[in-house]
Amino acid sequence: MGEIWKMQAGEIASAVRSRILSAEEVTRAHLDRIAAANPQLNAVVQEFPEEAMKSARALDARIAKGEDVGPLAGVPVTIKVNVDQAGHATTNGLVLQKDHVASADTPVVANLRKAGAVIVGRTNTPAFSMRWFTNNSLHGMTLNPRNTALTPGGSSGGAGSAVAAGFCAIGHGTDIAGSVRYPAYACGLHGLRPTLGRIPAWNSSLPDRYIGAQLMAVSGPLGRSISDIALSFEAMAAGDYRDPWWVPVPLRLGEFPKRAALCVRPDGLSVAPEVEAALRQAAAALTEAGWQVEEVDCPPLRPAAAINAQLWMAESRAVAQAIARENDPDANFVFARMTADSPEMDMPALMTALQQRVGMMREWSAFLARYPVLICPVSGELPFAQQQDVSSEAAFDAIMEAQLTQRALPVLGVPALAVATGMTSGAPVGVQLVAERFREDVLLAAGAAIEAACGVPQVEEL
């Protein structure tokens, strides 16, 4: 069977349910792996091994009684520190919130527990979860196990690093502008940003968020196989009345034509040769699997990216005093740079942005009706060097441009899947798949075909 911490989530769940392995054995193996390798990476920043072992033993006791413990039986997962987990601080990477202990689980955490998962730690995020890099004044910097000179991504960089290093089989992440998809890309993993309303979310320990985050922010899984993404997505998506945005739509919506669009340079995005090669490799994999792939231009993305910045920065401006009090150097730089490029939003601007958003969504729905899957870049560039965004204003602006698809797609409400395709030039590389709202099943089918051709990502041994 090999080392337990290298196993996929589906393999673990099957072995635990059949009592080939105990949840206690699985949890201990992953806790030992965290103890051995996390000091090098700083991916897991809140550890509670006794609590994790207690959960595993309780799970084994239920299995011994013949109970069905759920589809993620004994699967070790991590939770990002920007969502509530009962008994632990929802820090969001902030010194200001280091003692902000939650009294109840957010719905996605509750869903993972109900599905039989064992939480083995909480993972790092940048201050205010506001970067594609992971560093803050409270928890420090997280490194990328694939290449420590590169960012692990952000804001779910801790989750990406943890999954790639074998600290967990599934990492929970959140995404308002690429924070699941980019860490998956940077760490050589798969990561799903689901449709708004698929996975319920709510932090009872904090005020409800403003309209931008309500429309764009979602939770989603990072994993080392498409089958694990599908398994964890289904577990996370269970309904919860506490999130009024949750929608009871079936996870599988029937047959679809195997037709895909390849857009190498969406809306004029400059793309590195290695990224283009990965896109064409993915297109060839789908063609070989029986899909019809056509290279076309997709609808515009830049207007949606501008609305993302307006809405996101309107929320950030509302907590500008907290940003000043936190006084995190990286957060200060990022906030100043992003607000400089995004004018303040008054009521007429908000109304106009929301009006324009509907038209963009309609245009994209028409496109995705013709092409059920779009193949496009996750980023225009290979994963960035650590701290590259705060090295200069020019570097920051170049990164914002490279991340066009990360910023635009959340405004459109569509799901997207980052699919790893391998390593190139010492860096992970991959592609992004986009589908119509609530068609995660289409993404997973296409992702599985690409994975079959490119290989399943493996744990980085370090």
Image: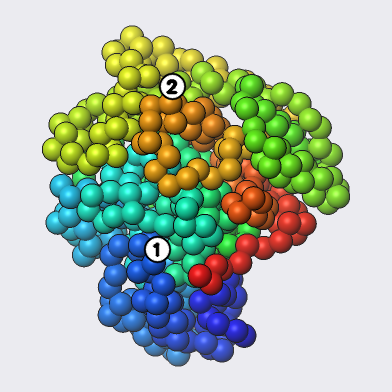
Tell me which corner region of the image, top left, top right, bottom left or bottom right, holds residue 41. bottom left
Residue at image mark 2 = 307
Q: CA distance from mark 2 to mark 1?
A: 35 Å
Question: As drawn, is 134 to the left or to the right of 273?
Answer: left
Give the numbered dot on residue 41: 1
The mark found on residue 59 in the picture is: none
Compared with 88, 244 (above or below) is above
User: In the figure, residue 171 lies in which quadrant?
Assistant: bottom left
Residue nearest the observer in this picture, 9 or 321: 321
Q: Point out the image quarter for the N terminus.
A: bottom right
The residue that appears at 37% across and 19% down in the rendered structure is 341
User: Where residue 106 sits: x, y (%)?
Assistant: 31, 54
Label 1: state its secondary structure.
helix
Q: Under tag 2, what secondary structure?
A: helix
Total number of numbered discs in the rendering: 2
Is 252 drawn above or below residue 394 in the view shown?
below
Residue extending farthest to the top is: 348
Is residue 253 at least partly visible in the picture?
A: no
- Graded by Cα atoms within 10 Å as few (under 14), some (14 to 19) or many (20 or more), the crowding at tag 2 reads many
Is residue 290 in view? yes
Residue plotted at (62% across, 27% down): 270
Name the colouring of the figure: rainbow
Amino acid type of disc 2?
Ile
Mark 2 or mark 1, which is nearer to you? 1
Q: Kindly identify the residue that appears in the image at 65 percent across and 44 percent down.
A: 431
86 and 452: which is toward the camera: 452
Q: Of callouts 2 and 1, which one flags the residue occurring earlier in the amino acid sequence?
A: 1
Q: Are marks 2 and 1 in contact (CB under 8 Å)?
A: no
Q: Would residue 279 appear left or right of 26 to someone viewing this image?
A: right
Residue 238 position within the rendered picture, expressed as x and y whole percent measured from the top left = 46, 56
Amino acid type indicated by mark 1: Leu
Q: Is residue 211 left or right of residue 235?
A: left
